[in-house]
Image: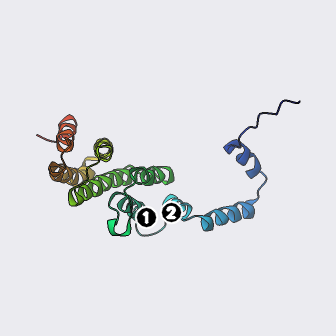
């Protein structure tokens, strides 16, 4: 019996090698086919090229749907999908102010939903606190004039988190102190 050959998985290098043979029209056609194949690719391209009135809107819709689902429609919470929306924005354009906005929005939606429905999910709360810290880091890298409004919103998240329990408010207060924001 012959030993079977080890199959190598296809990678970006293989795709890139094939793209060399495309002319301009071929590349435009390929991008068009990708654009029409998947809504997430449309969102990516709109963000990358700055198309539309609010390039953050589709990412916020996803975050909102994932962190404040419609319980009457049997929708479920998905921290992973909410985080993926932020990661997708980062890949598409990754402007620091947009990243900070999406991270703060994530915290607002997550804490608001938790308080409204009385969520009891420690993993969800841990993810919320981690995103709160990431938002603080992102805000700290912005120019001074862009920070106050985002910080006010995070402080409001901290305040309403007193109703969550699980040490969420204390963890957020500690982070605000660590980032020299909160007394």
What x and y, as percent, mark residue 149?
Answer: 22, 55
Please identify the quarter of the rendering in which residue 175 is found.
Answer: top left
Q: Quadrant of the N terminus?
A: top right
Label 1 residue SS: helix
Q: How many marks?
A: 2
Q: Quadrant of residue 183?
A: top left
Left of 78 or right of it: where is 45? right
Quarter assignment of residue 14: top right
Q: Is residue 96 left or right of residue 27?
A: left
Which colour assignment does the render follow? rainbow
Q: What crowding class fits label 2: few (fewer than 14 Cα within 10 Å), some (14-19), or many (20 or more)?
A: many
Asked if the residues shown at circle 2 and circle 1 are in contact, with their CB atoms under 8 angstroms apart, the answer is: yes
- Residue topped by disc 1: 58
Of 61 and 71, the residue lying toward us: 71
Q: Position of residue 156 (x, y in %)?
A: 18, 53
The secondary structure type at the circle numbered 2 is helix
Q: Position of residue 70 (x, y in %)?
A: 34, 66
Q: Residue at x 50, y 54 (%)?
A: 92
Badge 1: residue crowd in 10 Å (few <14, some 14–19, many ≥20): some
> If you read the primary sequence from the N terminus, does the residue marked by circle 2 or circle 1 appear first?
2
Relative height, residue 57 to residue 154 (above, below): below
Label 2, on which residue? 43
The image position of residue 107, as x and y in percent, is 28, 52
């Amino acid at each position: 019996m012959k030993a079977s050959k080890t199959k190598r998985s296809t990678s970006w290098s293989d795709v890139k090698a094939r793209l060399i043979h495309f002319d301009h029209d071929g590349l435009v056609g390929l991008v068009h086919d990708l654009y029409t194949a998947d809504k997430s690719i449309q969102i990516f391209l709109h963000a990358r090229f700055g198309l539309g009135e609010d390039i953050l809107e589709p990412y916020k819709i996803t975050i909102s749907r994932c962190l404040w689902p419609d319980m009457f429609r049997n929708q479920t919470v998905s921290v992973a999908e909410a985080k993926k929306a932020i990661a997708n924005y980062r890949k598409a354009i990754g402007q620091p102010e947009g990243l900070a906005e999406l991270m703060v929005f994530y915290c607002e939606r997550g804490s608001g939903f938790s308080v409204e429905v009385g969520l009891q999910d420690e993993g969800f709360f841990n993810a919320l606190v981690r995103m709160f810290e990431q938002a603080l880091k992102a805000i700290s890298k912005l120019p001074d004039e862009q920070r106050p409004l985002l910080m006010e919103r995070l402080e409001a998240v901290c305040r309403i988190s007193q109703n969550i329990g699980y040490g969420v408010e204390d963890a957020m207060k500690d982070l605000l102190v660590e980032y020299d924001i909160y007394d």
